[in-house]
Image (tube, grey):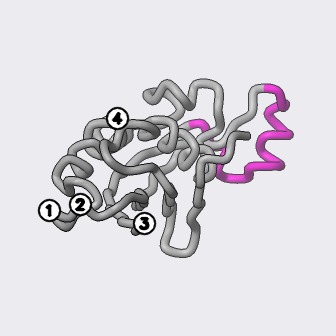
């Protein structure tokens, strides 16, 4: 088995807000990230798949097909969007880096022919990222 990672980039806006909390509690917990106008990030996504190398092609997966899947399932949905208002999975989930990684896993799981999804890593900033390996929470 070998692991293969492909990157993609998208830019999105979001804010942190829990409707179960009061306005004051949201502001205390989330600070300036609770501003409901939102703020943006240039995210980097890394998707790692696991599989065997095809002896004919030398590939684990068709790289163009993997790029197209990432574009269709993630980039076209998240890029230049306000996650809280425009992406269905964040109507009820706070779009933290952790929750974005989990949501992307669910968007990709079972959609990469010939390989198993191994890891989704989402960078919100160069020094902040979340990894998800498919553990069900």
Which residue is at a point 37% across and 50% down the rendered structure image?
A: 115
Count the numbered circles shown: 4
Q: CA distance from mark 1 to mark 3?
A: 15 Å
Q: What is the magenta range?
A: 20-36
Q: CA distance from mark 3 to mark 2?
A: 11 Å
Does the magenta portion include 93? no
Does the CB distance between marks 2 and 1 fall below 8 Å? yes
Q: Main secondary structure of the magenta part?
A: helix
Q: How far apart, in angstroms, are the residues tagged by discs 4 and 1?
A: 31 Å
Mark 4 / mark 3, whichever is N-terminal:
3
Position of the N terminus by quadrant: bottom left
- Which residue is under mark 2? 54
- x 46%, y 45%: residue: 13
Work out whether mark 4 precedes mark 1 in sequence or the reverse, and give the earlier one: 1
Q: Which residue is mark 4?
A: 77
- Mark 4 or mark 2: whose residue is earlier in sequence: 2
Q: Position of residue 98 (x, y in %)?
A: 63, 51
Q: Earlier in the sequence, mark 3 or mark 2?
A: 3
Say which mark, if any, is on residue 57: 1
Residue assigned mark 3 = 1
- For marks 1 and 3, the one nearer the N-term is 3
| Location of residue 17 by image quarter | top right
Taking 57 as reference, is 21 above or below it? Answer: above
Tell me the CA gap for discs 4 and 3.
Answer: 31 Å
Question: Can residue 30 be found in the magenta stretch?
Answer: yes
């Amino acid at each position: 088995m070998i692991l293969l990672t492909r990157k993609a980039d998208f830019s999105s806006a979001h804010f942190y807000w829990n409707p179960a909390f009061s306005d004051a509690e949201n502001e205390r917990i989330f600070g300036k990230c609770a501003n409901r106008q939102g703020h943006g990030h240039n995210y980097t996504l890394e998707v790692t798949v696991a599989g065997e190398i095809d002896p004919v092609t030398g590939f684990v997966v068709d790289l163009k097909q993997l790029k197209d899947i990432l574009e269709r399932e993630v980039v076209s949905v998240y890029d230049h969007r306000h996650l809280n208002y425009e992406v269905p999975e964040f109507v009820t989930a706070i779009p933290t880096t952790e929750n974005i990684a989990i949501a992307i896993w669910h968007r990709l799981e079972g959609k990469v022919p010939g390989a198993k999804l191994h890891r989704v890593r989402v960078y919100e900033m160069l020094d902040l990222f979340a990894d998800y390996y498919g553990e069900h929470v």
